[in-house]
Amino acid sequence: GAGVSQSPSNKVTEKGKDVELRCDPISGHTALYWYRQSLGQGLEFLIYFQGNSAPDKSGLPSDRFSAERTGGSVSTLTIQRTQQEDSAVYLCASRAPGPGQPQHFGDGTRLSIL
Amino acid sequence: RKEVEQDPGPFNVPEGATVAFNCTYSNSASQSFFWYRQDCRKEPKLLMSVYSSGNEDGRFTAQLNRASQYISLLIRDSKLSDSATYLCVVNARDDKIIFGKGTRLHILP
């Protein structure tokens, strides 16, 4: 079946612009996660959605970052007034309900801020 | 103590050798454990889940030691294609998922 789909694959934008990154999880997966990974670094947790519960936003680095998940499916991560330090790969993962379920990752969006 | 700790490596291992690495975790209430591999500039991919009784998938064996709070991954008869970063992942009871920073493995021809 279809995996986690992220778009765009690559995004180059000027400092100060807003960007929107999209994640389409695997059908039936109730949990959705956003991570950021800078070159040569580990995964940095950003935000987590589980069903209709309030999202866990504890990883968002600043108020320029926000995310929403409409209808319990597609999610959009928005970065306002981008800065050069926002350049990274943004990864989305989804997970099926129930204990012991692993995350499945999309290919990521490579964001470059000029 | 970090929530999930891994030796960053790199481990440089000749092709055909056996290599093992561990991962320690701090939350004794952790419920689920996984190993992922991540190739350079790619997304993490699930390698295997780790079960209490230990489990094997071909050349790969994973073990869980709840008493000492660590999991291990053993790779036998290593191949050049095994070169990657191996990520240890721990799920706490409340769905909090913690990734280790990864262990880099280089298989040498």
Image (cartoon, rainbow, N blue to C red):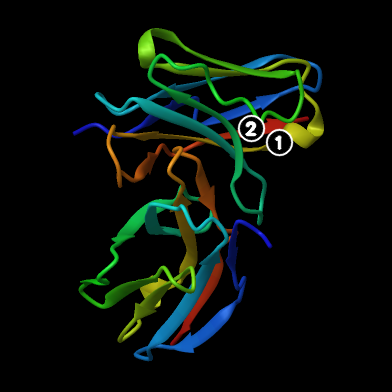
Q: Does label 2 or label 1 sit earlier along the sequence?
A: 1
CA gap, disc 2 to disc 1? 5 Å
- SS label for mark 1: loop
* Residue A108 horizontal/vertical position (percent): 49, 36
Residue displayed at 40% across by 16% down: A74
Residue displayed at 47% across by 65% down: B86
A50, A18: nearer the viewer: A50
> Where is residue A87, by image quadrant?
top right
Chain of the residue under label 1:
A
Residue type beneath disc 2: Leu
- Residue B48: image tag: none
Residue displayed at 66% across by 59% down: B2
B79, A14: nearer the viewer: B79
Residue type beneath disc 1: Ser
Read off the residue under disc 1: A87
- A101 lies left or right of B82: left
- Residue A111: image tag: 2
Question: Image height check: is B20 above or below B63?
Answer: below
